[in-house]
Amino acid sequence: MQKEVEKYLDKIKPSLQADGGDVELVEITEDGIVKVRLLGACKGCPMSTLTIKNGIERTLKENVPGVKEVRPV
């Protein structure tokens, strides 16, 4: 599952980097929780919750079987 998650995060990264931000994978738990760290302009951005839930989480849940949720750390 980790390689698939990383593959889709790599597809999301260019949009975040275009706005001065980035995302890194921290951990994937056994129960399908993907923990990510937002970096750069994304860190502390008021829209970061939407980025995680409507962007990253939606993409991963649609494309990677077993992903239940994405959480920031």
Image: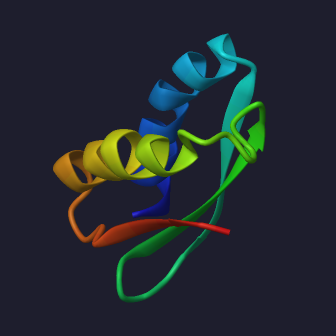
Please indicate whether residue 66 sits to the left or right of residue 69 in the image.
left
The quarter holding residue 43 reads top right
Q: Residue at x 53, y 18 (%)?
A: 15
The location of residue 31, given as percent across then percent down, is: 36, 88
Q: Nearer the viewer, residue 14 or 72?
A: 72
Query: Which image quadrant is residue 37 in?
Result: bottom right
Q: Which residue sits furthest right? A: 40
Residue at 49% over, 61% down? 2
Looking at the picture, how far across and down is residue 22, in whole percent?
69, 34
The residue drawn where x is 60% and y is 25% is: 16
Residue at the farthest front position: 46
Q: Quadrant of the C terminus?
A: bottom right
Q: Position of residue 10 (x, y in %)?
A: 54, 32
Seen in the picture, residue 53 relative to 70 is either above or below; the reply is above
Q: Is residue 27 left or right of residue 4?
A: right
Q: Based on the displayed image, in which of its 4 quarters is residue 26 positioned?
A: bottom right
The coloring applied to the image is rainbow
Where, quadrant-wise, is the N terminus in this rendering? bottom left
- Identify which residue is drawn at 18% across, 48% down: 62
- Count the numbered circles shown: 0
Give above or below for 42 relative to 11: below
Residue 71 to residue 53: above or below:
below
55 displayed left or right of 45:
left
Q: Residue furthest top?
A: 18
Residue 21 in the image, given as x and y percentages of width and height:
72, 29
